[in-house]
Image: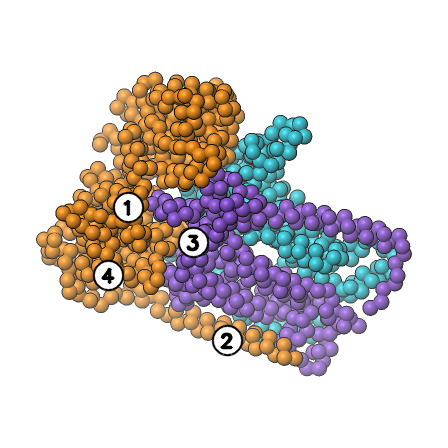
Chain colours: A orange, B cyan, C purple
Amino acid sequence: MAKTKRRTKRTAVGIGVMVFMLLAAGCGGNDGGNKAADKTEGQSSSAATASDKGGVKSTEQAKALKDLKITRLYHGAMETFKGSDTINSNRLIDKLREESGFNIQYEALPLENPSQKISIIFASGDVPDIMTIAGKSDYFKLAKQGALEPLDDLIAKEMPNVSNMAGQEALDAVKFDGKIYAIPYRQAQKVGNGLLARTDVLKELGLQEPGTLDEFYETMKTIKEKKNIAPLSIATSNPGYFFDGFTPFAAAFGVATPTKIKDGKLVFSWVQPEYKEFLETMKKWYDEGLLDQEFAIKKGTQDTLINGTAVFTPMYWGSVPEIDNALKDKKEGGTVGFIAPPVGKNGESGLQDSSISTTYIIIPKQAKNKLGAAQYLNFLYTPETDELVNYGIEGTDYTKKDGVITQTPEQSANIPWRSIYPLGDTDAGFAARLKAKGLLPYYEPLLQYKKLREETNYAPSVEAYDAKFTELRNYMEENSMKFIMGKRSLSEFDDYVKDFNAKGGQEAIDAMNEWYKNK
Amino acid sequence: MAKTNTGLPRPDLAATGGPLRAIRKHWDLYLMALPAIALIVIFKYLPMYGVIIAFKDYNPMQGMLDSEWVGFRFFRELFLFDEFPQVVRNTVAISLMKLAFGFPVPIILALLLNEMKYIRLKRTIQTMTYLPHFISWVIIGGIAIDLLSPSSGMVNKAIELLGFKPIFFLTEEGWFRWILIASDIWKEAGWGAIIFLAALIGINDELYQAATVDGANRWRQIWHISVPGLRATIIVILLLRIGNILDAGFEQVLVMYNPTVYDVSDIIDTYVFRVGLGTMQFSLTAAAGLFKSIIGCILLVLANTLARRMGEEGVY
Amino acid sequence: MQTQKPGIKAVRSDSVFQLLNAAFLSLISVSMLLPFIHIAAKSLSDQSHVVAKDVWLWPKGLNFSSYDFVLSYKQFYVSFGNSLFITVVGTLISMAVTLLAAYPLSRNGLPYRRLMMLIFVITMFFSGGLIPTYLIVKDVGLLNSLWSVILPGALAPFNLILIRNFFSGLPEAMEESARMDGASSLRILAQIYVPLSMPAIATISMFYAVGYWNSFFQAMMYLTDRSLMPLQVFLLQLVSNDKPADMVVNDVLSGVTPESMRAAAIICVVLPILCVYPFIQRYFVKGIMLGAVKG
């Protein structure tokens, strides 16, 4: 009996909750329309210090509000707060508030599928004053829909320091209908992937670091003979990863970027005769067992180098310390190092340029404090603030003597979350963080190699091109892998080219050339 | 069977008169359903107007209602993708294979477990079989890829020991779908069996006892008592699976496939995802979703009608 | 409950069957345990072995640094509490709503019964999509509260259908006699239907509980306050692959591979559910009341 009584009680509670909810729904419906009217009573800013630096006072615009909300993309550093610190309460943000004069609040988009949340934010009208968004297509879509504030005037009047973050070329690339709607989030990292080698194995076999593509091939053959392994390991299973793996080799044929310039016009690299040569060479490597037979299903290659089942692999520099550590822990030992990407018969070679930003800093059209947003960004982009957000508080987190900054690894590890606050990387800041973490030796060797410039990265939105690009890339990727693995005969390369162009490849490149011609 | 309803309306519940009268008569019953209906209405039906964005060029700045009508433009766009017919074919094929081979497995598993007399072992096994359900496809897929690797995977090592050549399970079009089916069964069979086990426990023990007295052997008991006892559950779950025929397992395919097997494994969801339509293309995504919903709903209604014709209770 | 003594032959064939069955089931269940052991082994291994893919079913270079790392976050405990609240309260509400609705829907001949059922079934196929749902959640005032993770999905039509099915399968005799004694519908549900369908109720409770425990999407959309994050969201972000470069490197230098950290996170999420299952199984006992009902 007691049991059933409890149960009845539980159901009663359930009903109670429902009734409450219905009431809440009713009330919510009533004030749903008040959104637009919900303007903040302007707490007029007591100190708009940032604008004083620019020295420009806009006449028609009201004074900047004090409250400023920033919604940024997720950053792993957000999880690193310890003790009573949080993203909106710690010594660094206190200092930022004090110096800028704005009551800033940072908030993060979810890590997974931020676009969804972004559209929800715009749809609900409850927008922040500054937001970072990822992806060229999303950005241009929002700009087209009128969701973003044009920044030309604000940049001219309020943000002289933007030049520290974005050059004219970068700003031109974000123009829509002739207007700038975003500040590209500056990437200080110039290159990501390099060609990593087990240098100890090369030494053991008395092999030189290969320079040309032919030498690379001969080196691989020797390794294969002596060790009976496939010397080159690549992982391209995920959609869009084909060129992450094959870039150093495609570069030797001059086809590592999606487009290239021929006779003063842009063409798709993937349909050129030299692309066929590239595929033929890779197929040869694959058939001779020099290239990992499982490259198509692999999702990572770190283990191959550690275990010595491969000698070369394209690798992101940030993953190298992990390999290094693992090798050190192993009894057999081993060393790894980046080698030069092989040079082709026409002297071509290179690595992927990773400095192109696909993250954008925008001010929503419905934002309440647009002026404040501009002033705060300008404040962030001063060298002084850059030092603050990259090192922390002077005295506590670093010391400065005669203009030379010293930060110990411990000091750096105490404020791992500082990288949440800057909205763009400066070279100095990036180098400082890497140095404090002891990572420069992994990154710097890559800087000496040629980086391949993809012209279309500097183009604004070209609809016919952007709309088709992913589909075309997928088609190229699927067929390239089939060609290499012999699942499709290379004698059908011409058919592939025909299909590619018919799928919209021709139209896309023609549209892009319209822009290139007038550049 | 004693437990099933006669199917005839009970005299005191029979509908006589209009809705008002029915409500007045059975107000207590309707009141009990009210919380559930309220939840559904508020959180599912009120937002339902959102399906119109499949027919609009949605712009968050204008809002759902004021965005421009574009009719069937996005449906046309979707259907005109070169790969679309193939993608639909793949979706249906993979789904049907999963249904044909995957659907009976949890039932068989539940029946076998139900027959088991060692209670301790039975419980342990039950717990173990439902474990993989909690591990995401990213992990399971990764393990499967390792296991099936032609050079280092355990499966191929075994194949080589038997004197055969290693099989490229994940890049051979002929193999790939079977790998999807098998790994899906392996991951979900234990979890799927739980509901059937609960149903089996509900079967009256006396039926088995009576059958034993009549000299019916184990197989006959399973066939004539256990299976009929599961019938209603089996049919409901089967009907719902039929309604979801266009969901062939997005996460699983995405993790396990690679460009060399797109031809046989790209399904609607992975295709839409891969072409990058998922990002802010709300209208197109909505069109794809609506297409799936309508097909699913039609199939369910047909299957349900058929089931009711055959004297089953059905889903609704 | 008396059973007749079966013949010798039947006993032998029965025990052979029992043995074969046990062997077969043990074999497949062991195969299903493998991934879990694999993950556990990884979570307990030294990072070098994990990166080298050395670890298969037994940890190599045993260490607990991955757990130290995951458990060192205070957010872990906050999130754990949130998930617990969502799961317990959510399951109670869901079960209450589902049972209440399942009873009338199982009443043969109740006018508009099929229509009501159809209303539920339709929502399994059609949804207004993300944005309108978000706007409703916002208008109802649930945004940035744990209720936003609970209420919108509190009723799963699938579970409702299953419970209704169990209810329709129950004998009517007892209900009728109770009704003659003047018992109300609510009382009949609580005193006859619920006790009679405990295995089903335990099962569906678990379906709901697991759903709440794993809820991820709603939390991502409706919660911005980080102190409200449930465990799944926290751990997924913590171990995500696409973290900015210098963060990944940061973790590596602190001695934890993303790979083993991910493994530890999975164990942290799955273990609590595993601990609950034995309690659910307790209700998987045959014929507690059924025998008494018949008659």
Left or right of A429? Residue A345 is: right
Marked residue chain, label 4 = A
Q: Which residue is drawn at 46% across and 26% down?
A: A231
Marked residue chain, label 2 = A
Q: What residue type is labelled 1?
A: Ala
Q: Which mark is residue A94?
A: 4
Q: Which of marks 2 and 3 is in front?
A: 3
Q: Nearer the viewer, mark 2 or mark 4?
A: 4
Q: Distance between the residues labelled 2 and 4?
A: 44 Å
Q: Distance between the residues labelled 1 and 3?
A: 21 Å
Precedes in sequence: disc 2 or disc 1: 2
Residue occupied by mark 3: C69
Residue occupied by mark 1: A436
Q: Position of residue C275 (x, y in %)?
A: 58, 61
Q: Do the residues labelled 4 and 3 touch (CB within 8 Å)?
A: no
Q: Distance between the residues labelled 2 and 1?
A: 57 Å
